Amino acid sequence: MATPSPTPSEHSEPPEVGIQGGGQELPICPLCKNREATGFSYCTFCCNACKMFFRRTLQKEIITQDRSLERFEKCIQAGMNYIPTENLLDVKNKKYLSAFITNLKYLEEHRQSQLRGCYYIGNPTVDEIAQLEGPIEFIKRPESFPMFLLDWVFITGMVSLNYLKQFTHAHLLNNSDRAHLLKHTFLDFSVFTDAMRVYQQKQDRTTVQPVLAGVPQEFLNGLRCRLAGRIEELKVTKEEFSLLTLVLFCNPALPNISDAGQVILNTYRQIYRHALFQHCLINYELDGPARLNDLLSIYHIIIQTRHDLLNLFTYKSDFFRAL
Ligand SMILES: [Zn+2]
């Protein structure tokens, strides 16, 4: 991959990295499998037609045709994502923000379906995952597949890593910075997603499935209740959750990140923060700034919850000990 600029382009697309020339034959696009891949667009190596299809679909927001949905899901599975870099402070221009939110909605659905129905054979380190070019390849989990406590902890961690590594800011980092970013965020992200799931299931009145089967439910609920309680109190929406995740976990202040890495993370955190702020202003008008602060305040509860959970699991999990 060529060294990309840490500053986002003036256009609303992430910067593209073309293939080196030299008369080499271009590889086939992994999405449609019938055209030549022309470059790196929306964080994925693909052909021009797939790139255009992804952009057009995001602008539509609702996908009505089955064939289009199937093709769009392939884009999502490949980790395609769009980050707007303009007009995020203009509340009258919602076009870019709404395409961004539509993209995040599908990425989140994909994350949840991986958690519900996938497994991974192997035990890679975070450094190895950080060096992977594309998404982690999961396998479908048969319904009868036995899942014990550590299996749930493991698959939750792997799915979180896969989610966090797909965004533009992670692609722009060098391998070492990307590994540090993932190591320092995937547990916090997992804790946040777990609490959000508990809150959403309560709202939907469905049965809460214990993700950490094998641990007394009362004990887990005690750990979760602070964070899930705050999420419930604020009635955090799915859109806010996805945008907030990007703000919180694109963190330039993490340890061991290089100067260049800090510039990238800082630049993208600003973009995500503007997007979340615009979303708050659109939905809360004058109370938008207060809403943004309330949402950002969730971070310290996530950290506290992760500390408590780590104290519980460190002594029995090789997964954590390996980090
Ligand atoms: Zn294609």
Image: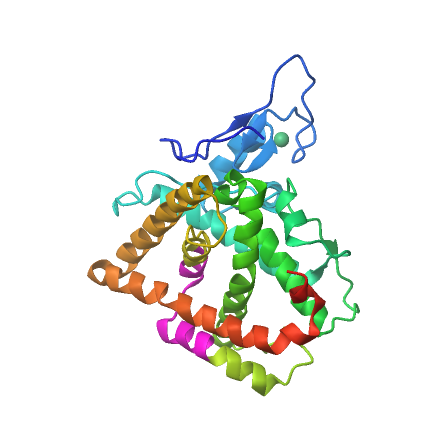
Can the viewer see residue 212 in this picture?
A: no
In magenta segment, residue 293? no
Which residue is painted at 53% across and 27% down in the image?
Answer: 17
Quadrant for the N terminus in the image? top right
Location of residue 180 in the rendering, given as x and y in whole percent from the top left corner:
55, 51
Query: On the rendered structure, is 137 left or right of 224?
Result: right
**Front position in the image: 65 or 210:** 210
Q: Could you tell me residue 246's position as x and y percent?
A: 44, 53
The residue under the point 30% across, 40% down is: 87
Look at the image and give the residue range highlighted in magenta: 226-242
The answer to whether residue 81 is visible is yes
The secondary structure making up most of the magenta span is helix
Q: Position of residue 64 (x, y in %)?
A: 53, 46
**Residue farthest to the left, as pictured:** 286
| Vertical order, 170 against 24 (above or below) | below
Q: Which of the two residues, 243 or 261, is positioned nearer the viewer here? A: 261
* 140 or 122: nearer the viewer: 122
